[in-house]
Amino acid sequence: MAQGDGAGTGAGPAVEAFVARLSGRPWSQTVVADDGIPATWQALRGGVHLRIMSVPPVRDLWVLPADWVGFQAVAVPFDLMRRDGVLIAMRAEERPSHVRELLDGLPGEGGRVLAAHVPQEAPPFATPASAAAADRHASELCARQVTTAVGRGAAITSFAALDIPAVTVFTQTVRDEDLQAATAAISILAHHGGDAAVAALLPTLGLMELTQDGIVRQREVAWGLAQIATPECGPVLLDDFAHLQDSETRESVVQALERIAYQPAAPAVLRMLEKTEDPYLQARYAKVLASLRYAPAVPAVARICRSAHPDADILMWDKHWLGGERPEIALLRLTASWGQPTAGVRLLLLPYARTVSGKGCRIALLIENLGGREADAMRFMQGCGDSAFVIDGVDHPDTGAAFDGCFTIRQHGTWVEVCTLAAAAIKPGRHRLSYHAGVAVANEVVIDVVAAP
């Protein structure tokens, strides 16, 4: 049977080199086409189509250039793999494929998962020039091959799975009459981010009709902008926020305003807080006002709290209520005497109304993330790294720790931890406490410790 080594295929040196390496494996292979396009896929160019025969059944394999642009017109399960500078495609099977096992055992660079199927290496569209070329090819392909809403949906799904930055196609689909295709495009733009994605989504936010489909689209656009909005979006987002009718959309918009720290939005958010009776939305708006450090909001935030002077007992009461966004935390962020901001955070010690000696001796620690991205709470928690309580001027670095849940603090988020002081053996009486973790230092508090009953 004829053997093919891929020489002279025109698919590029990486494809030719990979096909040549395959020819040395313990199987029989033949080149079916040197410009082959995977079955059920559409593309403007192809790669080497191989037929592999090792053990039954016979498998078809396509070795494509890494920057190949195509979409699957018919939904047939495919395994896709990026490795050694090429893209490999073959039909997926319910049972593990012998060919897949042989490919996985092929010496060379590893890969990462593509479309939740198989390994792939880094995407080949990292440079502006390569991304622009992929965008042009995707647009040309869709102009030639896509004639229906179903086709548009299939195209953007495939482009997303292959990490193809088809920004023009995604942008054009945002206002597509097909809801499923439009929402998929919005989600993909939010994932990719960048100026082009923002420019595609921002103008559409306030243009959606108040129909069921329109509200769904509007929610998707608002959610996307909450992930990728830039400070320049502030005026448009604020104007839309004042006119939006859907509460879920408003919530995403206010999240975007919080993320970009758009201070002029604070009065409008306060008015919305004073109008709403939904406890979840009240807490959400209070959190945003705290992030914006809007002091005039203090009376309104205090009115929705269980206490105008929250202590650790209030704070730890059902701390997962409202998803952890307690209005009491917002009030403390606006009014409490925190430690100085350092290392992207600030720390607050908050005593319980009654502190007893012995095993029950404890205090609450709040960590606020002041940075522009997620923060690792572990760096500042009790017992982690260079942390210690300072009790009456003496360091107590080994007072133990009590962990609960995920240790990541979102941007503008807080972490609440109950710290045990049992190991410090604090005697009944009045004591001064502070806390430090690395260079971050909490406020100093005075506690009256009583003897345990």
Image (cartoon, rainbow, N blue to C red):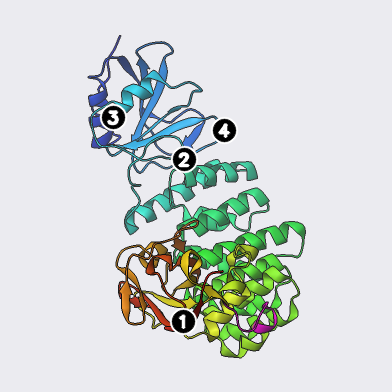
Q: Which residue is rendered at x = 42% and y = 10% of the image?
A: 56
Q: Do the residues labelled 2 and 1 touch (CB within 8 Å)?
A: no
Q: Which residue is rendered at x = 73% and y = 56% of the image?
A: 213
Magenta part, dominant SS? loop
Q: Which of marks 4 and 2 is nearer the N terminus?
A: 4
The residue tagged with tag 2: helix, strand or loop? loop
Q: Do the residues labelled 4 and 2 touch (CB within 8 Å)?
A: no
Q: How far apart are marks 1 and 3 (CA)?
A: 85 Å
Q: Which tag is nearer the camera, tag 1 or tag 3? A: 1
Q: Distance between the residues labelled 1 and 4?
A: 72 Å
Task: Give the magenta range.
Answer: 302-311
Q: How far apart are marks 4 and 2 (CA)?
A: 13 Å
Is residue 398 something one can see in this rendering? yes
Residue 242 coordinates in the image, percent (x, y): 68, 79
- Quadrant of residue 9 within the rendered picture: top left
- Quadrant of residue 318 within the rendered picture: bottom right
Q: Which residue is rendered at x = 67% and y = 85% of the image?
A: 300
Q: Which of marks 2 and 1 is nearer the N terminus?
A: 2
Give the residue number, with chain letter if any, for mark 3: 9
Q: Earlier in the sequence, mark 3 or mark 2?
A: 3
Give the residue number, with chain letter if any, for mark 4: 75
Q: Which tag is nearer the camera, tag 1 or tag 4? A: 1
Give the residue number, with chain letter if any, for mark 2: 115
Q: Do the residues labelled 1 and 3 touch (CB within 8 Å)?
A: no
